[in-house]
Image (cartoon, rainbow, N blue to C red):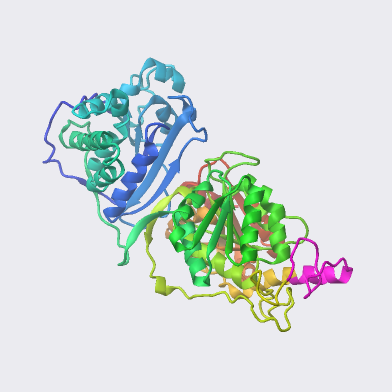
Amino acid sequence: MESVVSSDGNAALKLAEVPREELDAVVVRFAGDSGDGIQLTGSRFADATAVAGLDLETFPDFPAEIRAPLGTTYGVSAFQINFGSGLILTSGDAPDVLVALNPAALIVNIEEVKPGGLVIVDSGSFSEKNLQKAGYKSNPLEDDSLEKYRIFPIDISRLTLESVSGTAVNKRDGLRCKNMWTLGLISWMYDRDLAPTSDWLEGKFRKKLPDVAEANIAALKAGHAFGETAEMPDGVRGYTIQPADFEPGIYRTVTGTEATAWGLVAGARLAGLNIMMCSYPITPASGLLHVLARLKSYGVTTFQAEDEIAAVGAAIGASYAGALGVTSSSGPGIALKTEAIGLAIATELPLIVVNTQRAGPSTGMPTKTEQSDLYLAVYGRNADSPLVVLSAHSSADSFDVAIEAVRLATKYMTPVIILSDTYIANAAEPWRVPDADHFEPFKVDFRTESAGFQPFMRDDKTLARPWVKPGTPGLEHRIGGLERAYDSGNVSYDPENHQRMTNVRIGKIEGIADDIPLQTVEVGADSGQLAVIGWGSTYGPIRTAVKNLRAEGKAVSHIHLRYINPMPRNLGELLARFDKVLVPEMNMGQLSTILRDRFLAPAEGLHKVTGKPFRIVEIEDGIRASLEK
């Protein structure tokens, strides 16, 4: 073992004379039992880091089980944050620092830590019982199994109880403060201000649970004081990371769920509409309903339905009534909604469907990320029933994608599916709050003129039918799922009419390609040896990997799609300028199939379905392998 130090926190040693080492970026992972408050620890550290002006990206990784047995590997919760003074686009590859609050957290995460990385463990939790639960046959702190890491065991449990001994909390509640003790230590290590977290604890607990607030703040300060005064092992010290060079403006951290909700509200206001959000809870999509439920003052009404089908049906009804119908779910829930989405296509009503993808078929792996539903979004309905599919590439990007979804849905009277995923929904990053005057309104004009009205008469350019609020005098009409006559909307089984209606529904969606931007290249030239094309949350690792390899002289470029259906007009021609096309996806090749189908592009897949996002190094290895073929 390179360096093992048993510290009880009493060996006071002033380290003021030891200068802080300056770093450009670092990756820290907190891990513990799902009851240890790991997600709270990580999110508070992320907020303090953002306040300090650093760029960051986070990756909350929590168990699917609502409450797995205490101390088991099934209940391990983790939160990773990558922060630095430069541009941060991913939550980082291998952690530089792992904080493990029990043996299960250590055994689950240790293999991903960099060789030589620092591992801080709560030695007080390494009891024989907990070691057995985690699957250890011997105590890893006492053998040589961790010799390639720098291990720093601290009896965090005991030190936390000591730090809260002056408060009125009992032992059980006091022990729950060890996440704050840990946060205090890491805050000292990376020179974070305690005030944002201390203020947050005051605001959350002071009124109703003042003892809890006092205990948590005491533990937070004690952890920080430990870092300042304790004798540290060789190589463990304080670090400084300079603030990132952001454009001037007001910033805040934002998750993909928050950005999607705010984008939908912004889009609805630009369209002059109220939102009716109808959803049924499912991980990881439920958060969107939660965020929108707090925005009633912005014209948002939320409805938790009894099931997925009821939710989408209510959203379609809201759109029929003149609001913006929105529904959300994840893969299995979207599958239940597909027949009703077909109804929205048939009735030609605007509808926003947010699909926050998760791993696996059926109910799969609820808290793990995957790009599982591209086929479902593009093809997953009966008959020839195209709709618009958009994809957000990051948490902050979700805001703009949601606005664009509202614009296209209302302009073309069509359902729009927004593809997000577990990673985007939960990850946080700095977001520059936009100027509301920056956006161009696209106000909806409901038809009120009865002269010459037919419910399926169409705008010559958009092929959209008129949107009429029920009860408008002289514009009474009916809609439904049965095929209807062109213009009149009366039920029709006429073969030629069905052909014509099918053609116009397809033509309307294809024509939207004239109303979206041409595809650009994110990094690199617009021709060369290899194009790496992606969609969704693979943006960060692909972009970083391509930049790294271009620095080595490789003729590789990065293309990233926001518009999945229809695709940009120039995409096929752009891909044809490259010798090879590599498609990294967190599935087994769904975009690859579509690119080969539409453009005969020589798309080669790079697949990963572990429930975890791509690492930069995995993309780099894939690019190198493709170039060497």
Q: Nearer the viewer, residue 562 or 626?
A: 562
Residue 72's x, y, as percent?
A: 46, 25
Q: Residue at x 34, y 40 (%)?
A: 41
Above or below, comparing residue 370 to residue 523 in the picture? above
Above or below, comparing residue 36 to residue 625 in the picture? above
The magenta stretch spans which residues?
Answer: 477-504
Q: Residue at x 39, y 25 (%)?
A: 103
Above or below, comparing residue 422 to residue 145 in the picture? below
Q: Residue at x 23, y 38 (%)?
A: 217
Q: Is residue 86 left or right of residue 219?
A: right
Residue 117's x, y, as percent?
A: 34, 37
Q: Nearer the viewer, residue 492 or 624?
A: 492
488 magenta-colored: yes
Quarter the N terminus occupies: top left
- Give the quadrant of residue 137: top left
Q: Is residue 276 left or right of residue 508?
A: left
Magenta stretch secondary structure, dominant = loop
